[in-house]
Image (cartoon, rainbow, N blue to C red):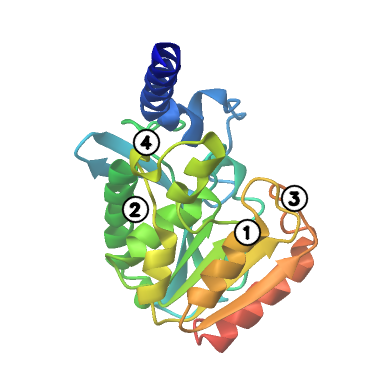
């Protein structure tokens, strides 16, 4: 009996130590910023990128804005705020997302604190402050229509833009390869969900959001299972879901089809 009690006590201590370790290292897992290769310098002017620095309580965070192509958009024009995945930088996205400016929609790509050239450390709190500052700066531009700002988040970026949607009103919301909540992944590590420091509860935000929402997810997503996308769509009051035969990092598998789908959604939402 004493041996059994000692075994149970040791197991509890080991599990408690394991949970304590997870609590302290989880941000290195969720925000693997030091594992991202440094991109080659970009000619921002040639790409029509207007760099901006957002003043936050922890320092300056970078954002890039690409205005609509000349002669395509009216004034003021609609705009998109984009949040990228946790293993990416804003540097990776101007080429992939250039269709937004080409169709007459401004594009603001916001960096995460501590990523790339930006100050601070990533967390839900610091990302929330950054994206709120980014929205306010974008909405104040005379060439942007504040009533037609779309939030678009990929993977972790879905958490960033959903958090923003709880504070600022988007005209429409696009979530690609995103999740219901970071807490839902705790079970993978055999840990209680209350240990998650940055929960990013997208599902709660989606339930309260009554604007048009587009969920895009790969059926074979190995990082964020397809069920997360389905749950977000089912919780949406005014949602549409598009499923692609893709995983996580190859979604969308066909960018031309993706743009047709996005353009149709924006047209139906009376954004574009």
Q: Earlier in the sequence, mark 2 or mark 3?
A: 2
Quadrant of the image containing the C terminus: bottom right
Q: Quadrant of residue 143?
A: bottom left
Identify which residue, 163 or 181, lies in the foreground. Answer: 181
The residue that disc 2 covers is 131
Coordinates of residue 62 in the picture (x, y in percent):
39, 41
Quadrant of the image containing the N terminus: top left
Q: Quadrant of residue 9?
A: top left
The reply to whether callout 2 and callout 3 are in contact (CB within 8 Å) is no
How far apart marks 2 and 3 lie (CA) works out to 26 Å
Q: Closer to us: mark 2 or mark 3?
A: 3
- Element under label 3? loop
Q: Earlier in the sequence, mark 3 or mark 1?
A: 1
How far apart marks 1 and 4 lie (CA) works out to 26 Å
Identify which residue, 82 or 240, lies in the foreground. Answer: 240
Residue 222 visible: yes
The reply to whether callout 3 and callout 1 are in contact (CB within 8 Å) is no
How far apart marks 2 and 1 lie (CA) works out to 21 Å
Identify which residue, 136 or 32, lies in the foreground. Answer: 32
The tag on residue 98 is 1
Q: Earlier in the sequence, mark 1 or mark 4?
A: 1
Specify the farthest residue to the front: 1
Q: What residue sits 63% from the left and 75% below the top?
A: 241
The residue that disc 4 covers is 122
Vertical placement of residue 86 versus 209, above or below: above
The residue that disc 3 covers is 250
């Amino acid at each position: 009996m004493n041996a059994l009690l000692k075994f149970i006590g040791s197991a509890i201590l080991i599990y408690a130590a394991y949970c304590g370790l997870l609590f302290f290292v989880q941000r290195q897992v969720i925000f693997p910023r030091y594992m991202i290769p440094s991109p080659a310098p970009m000619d921002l002017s040639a790409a029509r990128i207007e760099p901006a620095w957002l003043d936050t309580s922890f320092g300056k965070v970078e954002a890039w804005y690409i205005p609509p192509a000349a002669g395509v958009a009216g004034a003021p024009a609609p705009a998109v705020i984009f949040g990228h995945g946790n293993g990416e930088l804003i540097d990776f996205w101007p080429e992939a997302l250039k269709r937004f400016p080409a169709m007459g929609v401004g594009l603001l790509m916001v960096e995460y604190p501590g990523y790339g050239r930006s100050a601070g450390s990533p967390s839900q709190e610091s990302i929330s402050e950054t994206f709120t500052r980014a929205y306010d700066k974008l909405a104040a531009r005379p060439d942007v229509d504040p009533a037609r700002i779309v939030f678009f988040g990929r993977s972790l970026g879905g958490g960033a833009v959903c958090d923003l949607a709880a504070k600022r009103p988007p005209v429409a919301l696009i979530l690609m390869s995103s999740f219901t909540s970071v807490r839902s992944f705790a079970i993978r590590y055999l840990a209680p969900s209350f240990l998650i420091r940055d929960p990013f509860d997208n599902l709660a935000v989606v339930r309260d959001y009554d604007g048009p929402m587009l969920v895009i997810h790969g059926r074979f997503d190995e990082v964020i299972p397809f069920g997360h996308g389905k749950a977000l769509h089912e919780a949406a009051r005014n949602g549409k879901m598009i499923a692609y035969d893709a995983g996580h990092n190859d979604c969308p598998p066909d960018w031309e089809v993706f743009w047709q789908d996005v353009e149709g959604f924006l047209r139906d939402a009376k954004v574009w």
